[in-house]
Amino acid sequence: MWFQTSLRLAPRSRGFHLISDEIERALPALPDMRIGLLHVFIQHTSASLTVNENADPTVREDFERHFNVMVPEDAPYYRHTDEGSDDMPAHLKASLLGPSLTVPVGNGRLSLGTWQGIYLCEHRDHGGSRNLVLTLNGERSRWQPGQDVPDPYRRR
């Protein structure tokens, strides 16, 4: 089974933002998936996606501080400066982290680790809304959410 949809995220401030719940809500087919993969692609060049710590917000704050040191604004060698001092660094940060993620799906859920969440990495001061393409592929199950998933290899 294939399912694809777009998700428009509300504008966010510069920084690293958890969006796992928004992605799950945008996938009505997810609870029916026994096994599969979710591909998440961001259609922008100045924002990116990554998976990391979902519990302690200081991790997201440290990400922002580290990337601002690693890729500073106003570097004298930047030539792409017409859109502001945050634009070229945003492109570089987005390339370092990447535009897409693939997350395994099992038993009707994203198979993220206990402390993992999907981040929108907003690298612009005023990036605006962001568009994601969500592509879910896998095998549907006949089970109902909340039940144990039957093991097709188990002898009966």
Image: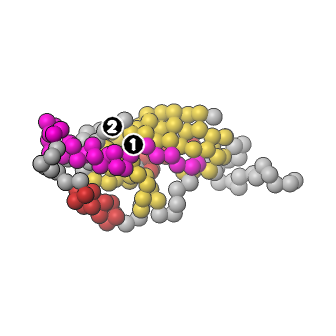
The disc placed on residue 54 is: none
Q: How is the image coloured?
A: secondary structure
Q: Is the N terminus in the top left, top right, bottom left or bottom right quadrant?
A: top right
In the current view of this chain or complex, which residue is farthest to the front? Answer: 77
Could one spot residue 92 in this view of the protein? yes
Q: Which residue is mark 1?
A: 99
The reply to whether the C-beta atoms of the residues labelled 1 and 2 are less than 8 Å apart is yes
Query: Position of 51 compared to 37: left or right?
Result: left
Element under label 1? Answer: loop
| Residue at 15%, 46% in the rendered image | 77
Q: Residue at x 65, y 54 (%)?
A: 146
Sooner in the amino-acid sequence: mark 1 or mark 2: 2
Q: Which residue is mark 2?
A: 44
Query: Magenta residues, as a range?
Result: 79-105
Mark 1: few/some/many CA within 10 Å (<14, 14-19, 20+): many
Residue 125 falls left or right of residue 149: left
The amino acid sitting under disc 1 is Pro
Residue 27 lies, with reference to residue 55, above or below; the image says above
Residue 89, position as x, y percentages in the image = 23, 47
Q: Residue at x 48, y 38 (%)?
A: 134
Give me the residue at 35% from left, 41% from top.
Answer: 9
Badge 2 amino acid: His
Q: Position of residue 44 (x, y in %)?
A: 33, 37
